[in-house]
Amino acid sequence: MDSSHNKSAKKAVILVSGGLDSATCLAIARAEGYDCFALSFNYGQRANSELDAAMRLSTAFSVHQHQVIPLGIGQLGGSALTDSSVAMPESGVVADQIPVTYVPARNTVFLSYALAWAEVLEADAIFIGVNALDYSGYPDCRPEFIKAFEQMANLATRIGVEGRPIRIKTPLIDLSKAQIIAMGNELGVNYRLTVSCYQADSKGRACGRCDSCRLRRKGFEDAGVKDPTVYVDTAFAG
Protein backbone atom coordinates (compact mmCIF):
# COMPACT_ATOMS: atom_id res chain seq x y z
CA MET A 1 0.00 0.00 0.00
CA ASP A 2 1.10 3.51 -0.78
CA SER A 3 2.05 5.24 2.49
CA SER A 4 2.76 8.60 0.82
CA HIS A 5 0.17 11.06 -0.31
CA ASN A 6 -0.15 14.60 -1.58
CA LYS A 7 -0.94 16.74 1.46
CA SER A 8 -2.93 19.13 -0.72
CA ALA A 9 -5.05 16.39 -2.30
CA LYS A 10 -8.56 15.74 -1.08
CA LYS A 11 -8.80 12.72 1.22
CA ALA A 12 -11.56 10.28 2.03
CA VAL A 13 -12.13 7.47 4.49
CA ILE A 14 -13.88 4.56 2.79
CA LEU A 15 -15.67 1.91 4.83
CA VAL A 16 -14.51 -1.36 3.24
CA SER A 17 -16.29 -4.51 4.40
CA GLY A 18 -14.88 -6.70 1.65
CA GLY A 19 -18.23 -6.95 -0.12
CA LEU A 20 -19.43 -5.91 -3.54
CA ASP A 21 -20.88 -2.54 -2.54
CA SER A 22 -17.90 -1.32 -0.55
CA ALA A 23 -15.54 -2.38 -3.37
CA THR A 24 -17.59 -0.27 -5.79
CA CYS A 25 -17.53 2.65 -3.33
CA LEU A 26 -13.75 2.41 -3.13
CA ALA A 27 -13.51 2.48 -6.94
CA ILE A 28 -15.82 5.53 -7.11
CA ALA A 29 -13.82 7.43 -4.48
CA ARG A 30 -10.60 6.77 -6.37
CA ALA A 31 -12.22 7.78 -9.69
CA GLU A 32 -13.35 11.04 -8.07
CA GLY A 33 -9.73 11.84 -7.26
CA TYR A 34 -9.65 11.18 -3.53
CA ASP A 35 -6.63 9.89 -1.67
CA CYS A 36 -8.26 6.78 -0.21
CA PHE A 37 -7.94 5.51 3.37
CA ALA A 38 -9.73 2.20 3.91
CA LEU A 39 -11.38 1.30 7.22
CA SER A 40 -12.63 -2.18 8.12
CA PHE A 41 -13.90 -3.77 11.32
CA ASN A 42 -13.48 -7.12 12.98
CA TYR A 43 -16.71 -6.93 14.94
CA GLY A 44 -17.37 -10.60 15.55
CA GLN A 45 -18.98 -11.31 12.19
CA ARG A 46 -19.52 -14.95 11.26
CA ALA A 47 -17.96 -14.49 7.81
CA ASN A 48 -14.42 -13.56 8.85
CA SER A 49 -13.21 -14.18 5.30
CA GLU A 50 -14.72 -10.81 4.36
CA LEU A 51 -11.83 -9.16 6.21
CA ASP A 52 -9.41 -11.04 3.97
CA ALA A 53 -11.39 -9.65 1.04
CA ALA A 54 -11.14 -6.12 2.46
CA MET A 55 -7.37 -6.50 2.64
CA ARG A 56 -7.22 -7.79 -0.95
CA LEU A 57 -9.29 -4.85 -2.17
CA SER A 58 -7.19 -2.32 -0.26
CA THR A 59 -4.07 -3.73 -1.89
CA ALA A 60 -5.66 -3.88 -5.35
CA PHE A 61 -6.71 -0.23 -5.12
CA SER A 62 -3.37 0.89 -3.62
CA VAL A 63 -5.02 2.75 -0.75
CA HIS A 64 -2.75 4.98 1.29
CA GLN A 65 -3.58 3.15 4.50
CA HIS A 66 -5.89 0.35 5.59
CA GLN A 67 -6.97 0.05 9.22
CA VAL A 68 -8.79 -2.94 10.68
CA ILE A 69 -10.42 -2.02 14.00
CA PRO A 70 -11.43 -4.75 16.50
CA LEU A 71 -14.87 -4.18 18.01
CA GLY A 72 -16.98 -6.11 20.49
CA ILE A 73 -20.37 -5.66 18.83
CA GLY A 74 -20.63 -9.43 18.39
CA GLN A 75 -20.51 -9.90 22.18
CA LEU A 76 -23.84 -8.06 22.45
CA GLY A 77 -25.66 -10.56 20.24
CA GLY A 78 -28.97 -9.70 18.62
CA SER A 79 -28.05 -10.60 15.04
CA ALA A 80 -27.64 -13.70 12.89
CA LEU A 81 -24.44 -12.12 11.54
CA THR A 82 -22.72 -12.27 14.91
CA ASP A 83 -24.51 -15.02 16.83
CA SER A 84 -24.15 -18.54 15.45
CA SER A 85 -27.09 -19.70 17.60
CA VAL A 86 -29.43 -17.52 15.50
CA ALA A 87 -30.46 -19.28 12.30
CA MET A 88 -29.42 -17.56 9.09
CA PRO A 89 -32.55 -16.79 7.03
CA GLU A 90 -32.61 -18.42 3.60
CA SER A 91 -36.19 -17.80 2.51
CA GLY A 92 -36.02 -14.18 1.38
CA VAL A 93 -36.84 -10.81 2.90
CA VAL A 94 -40.25 -10.32 4.51
CA ALA A 95 -41.80 -6.96 3.56
CA ASP A 96 -41.92 -4.31 6.31
CA GLN A 97 -39.92 -6.50 8.67
CA ILE A 98 -36.35 -5.83 9.77
CA PRO A 99 -34.50 -9.14 9.34
CA VAL A 100 -32.42 -10.94 11.96
CA THR A 101 -29.29 -10.16 9.90
CA TYR A 102 -29.55 -6.54 11.05
CA VAL A 103 -26.70 -5.78 13.47
CA PRO A 104 -27.97 -3.26 16.06
CA ALA A 105 -26.46 0.22 15.52
CA ARG A 106 -23.65 -1.18 13.34
CA ASN A 107 -23.47 1.67 10.83
CA THR A 108 -23.72 4.24 13.62
CA VAL A 109 -20.67 2.69 15.29
CA PHE A 110 -18.77 2.26 12.00
CA LEU A 111 -19.41 5.82 10.91
CA SER A 112 -18.34 7.14 14.31
CA TYR A 113 -14.95 5.48 13.94
CA ALA A 114 -14.71 6.69 10.35
CA LEU A 115 -15.52 10.21 11.54
CA ALA A 116 -12.79 10.08 14.18
CA TRP A 117 -10.19 8.96 11.63
CA ALA A 118 -11.43 11.49 9.08
CA GLU A 119 -10.90 14.25 11.64
CA VAL A 120 -7.36 13.06 12.37
CA LEU A 121 -6.60 12.90 8.63
CA GLU A 122 -8.40 16.21 7.95
CA ALA A 123 -10.31 14.29 5.31
CA ASP A 124 -13.03 15.84 3.20
CA ALA A 125 -15.40 12.90 3.01
CA ILE A 126 -16.45 9.50 4.28
CA PHE A 127 -17.75 6.97 1.74
CA ILE A 128 -20.14 4.23 2.80
CA GLY A 129 -21.84 1.73 0.48
CA VAL A 130 -25.32 1.82 1.99
CA ASN A 131 -28.20 1.14 -0.36
CA ALA A 132 -31.89 1.91 0.11
CA LEU A 133 -33.15 0.02 -2.95
CA ASP A 134 -31.73 -3.51 -3.21
CA TYR A 135 -31.15 -4.07 0.49
CA SER A 136 -32.52 -6.06 3.40
CA GLY A 137 -34.56 -3.38 5.16
CA TYR A 138 -31.87 -2.16 7.58
CA PRO A 139 -32.84 1.14 9.25
CA ASP A 140 -29.23 2.39 9.17
CA CYS A 141 -29.10 2.22 5.35
CA ARG A 142 -31.76 4.90 4.83
CA PRO A 143 -31.07 8.43 3.48
CA GLU A 144 -32.71 9.90 6.62
CA PHE A 145 -30.12 8.21 8.82
CA ILE A 146 -27.17 9.35 6.69
CA LYS A 147 -28.43 12.95 6.63
CA ALA A 148 -28.91 12.96 10.41
CA PHE A 149 -25.46 11.46 11.01
CA GLU A 150 -23.80 14.05 8.77
CA GLN A 151 -25.53 16.85 10.67
CA MET A 152 -24.42 15.35 13.99
CA ALA A 153 -20.85 14.86 12.70
CA ASN A 154 -20.48 18.53 11.88
CA LEU A 155 -21.82 19.54 15.29
CA ALA A 156 -19.59 17.15 17.22
CA THR A 157 -16.15 17.64 15.64
CA ARG A 158 -13.48 20.29 15.65
CA ILE A 159 -13.37 20.41 11.86
CA GLY A 160 -17.13 20.89 11.71
CA VAL A 161 -17.13 23.66 14.30
CA GLU A 162 -14.23 25.37 12.51
CA GLY A 163 -16.24 25.52 9.31
CA ARG A 164 -14.73 22.58 7.41
CA PRO A 165 -17.75 20.28 7.25
CA ILE A 166 -17.23 16.65 6.34
CA ARG A 167 -19.45 14.96 3.78
CA ILE A 168 -20.93 11.50 4.22
CA LYS A 169 -21.02 10.23 0.63
CA THR A 170 -23.39 7.43 -0.37
CA PRO A 171 -22.98 7.03 -4.15
CA LEU A 172 -24.88 3.73 -4.24
CA ILE A 173 -27.89 4.65 -2.14
CA ASP A 174 -30.41 4.91 -5.00
CA LEU A 175 -28.94 2.24 -7.30
CA SER A 176 -30.09 -1.30 -7.96
CA LYS A 177 -27.59 -4.11 -7.44
CA ALA A 178 -27.37 -4.48 -11.23
CA GLN A 179 -26.58 -0.77 -11.63
CA ILE A 180 -23.91 -1.00 -8.92
CA ILE A 181 -22.28 -3.96 -10.66
CA ALA A 182 -22.42 -2.23 -14.06
CA MET A 183 -20.78 0.87 -12.59
CA GLY A 184 -18.09 -1.15 -10.84
CA ASN A 185 -17.45 -3.10 -14.01
CA GLU A 186 -16.81 0.16 -15.87
CA LEU A 187 -14.42 1.24 -13.11
CA GLY A 188 -12.48 -2.02 -13.31
CA VAL A 189 -13.56 -3.61 -10.03
CA ASN A 190 -12.51 -7.26 -9.81
CA TYR A 191 -15.55 -8.67 -8.01
CA ARG A 192 -13.85 -12.03 -7.63
CA LEU A 193 -11.85 -10.39 -4.82
CA THR A 194 -15.03 -9.64 -2.86
CA VAL A 195 -17.02 -11.67 -0.32
CA SER A 196 -20.71 -10.81 0.18
CA CYS A 197 -22.07 -14.01 1.74
CA TYR A 198 -23.35 -13.75 5.32
CA GLN A 199 -21.97 -17.20 6.11
CA ALA A 200 -19.02 -17.62 3.76
CA ASP A 201 -16.52 -20.30 4.74
CA SER A 202 -12.91 -19.67 5.76
CA LYS A 203 -11.91 -19.64 2.07
CA GLY A 204 -14.52 -17.01 1.25
CA ARG A 205 -16.76 -19.43 -0.64
CA ALA A 206 -20.40 -18.33 -0.68
CA CYS A 207 -23.36 -20.40 0.53
CA GLY A 208 -25.59 -19.28 -2.35
CA ARG A 209 -28.71 -19.34 -0.16
CA CYS A 210 -28.65 -16.32 2.19
CA ASP A 211 -30.26 -12.94 1.37
CA SER A 212 -26.94 -11.41 0.41
CA CYS A 213 -26.06 -14.25 -1.96
CA ARG A 214 -29.45 -14.04 -3.65
CA LEU A 215 -29.25 -10.27 -4.13
CA ARG A 216 -25.71 -10.55 -5.46
CA ARG A 217 -26.48 -13.37 -7.89
CA LYS A 218 -29.59 -11.59 -9.22
CA GLY A 219 -27.56 -8.39 -9.61
CA PHE A 220 -25.03 -10.09 -11.88
CA GLU A 221 -27.84 -11.73 -13.88
CA ASP A 222 -29.70 -8.42 -14.33
CA ALA A 223 -26.49 -6.59 -15.25
CA GLY A 224 -25.59 -9.21 -17.83
CA VAL A 225 -22.19 -9.66 -16.20
CA LYS A 226 -20.69 -13.08 -15.50
CA ASP A 227 -20.90 -13.90 -11.80
CA PRO A 228 -17.33 -14.51 -10.54
CA THR A 229 -18.49 -15.64 -7.09
CA VAL A 230 -16.94 -18.86 -5.80
CA TYR A 231 -19.67 -21.00 -4.20
CA VAL A 232 -19.37 -23.93 -1.82
CA ASP A 233 -22.01 -25.65 -3.96
CA THR A 234 -20.99 -25.32 -7.61
CA ALA A 235 -24.66 -25.66 -8.60
CA PHE A 236 -25.05 -21.93 -7.82
CA ALA A 237 -22.22 -20.91 -10.17
CA GLY A 238 -23.31 -19.07 -13.28
Image (cartoon, helix red, strand yellow):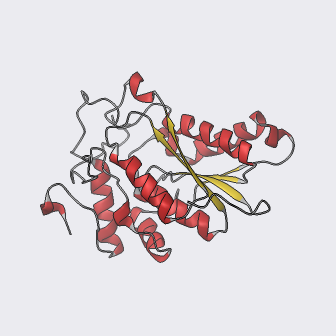
**Quarter of the image with the N terminus in it:** bottom right
Give me the residue at 30% from left, 42% from top.
94
Front residue (pair 104, 143): 104
> Looking at the picture, how far across and down is residue 47, in whole percent?
32, 43
- Toward the viewer: 160 or 205? 205
Residue at image point 55% right, 39% down: 110
Q: Which residue is at a point 26% across and 29% down the rendered structure image?
A: 86
Q: Percent position (x, y) of residue 88?
A: 25, 38
Direction top: furthest residue: 76
The total number of labels drawn is: 0
**224 or 92: nearer the viewer:** 224
Left-right relation of 114 to 132: right
Picture layout, residue 162 above or below residue 190: above
Q: Residue at x 24, y 54 (%)?
A: 205
Residue 74 position, x and y percent, is 40, 28
| 81, above or below 128, in the image | above
Q: Quadrant of the C terminus?
A: bottom left
Name the side, left or right, on which 227 lies relative to 4: left
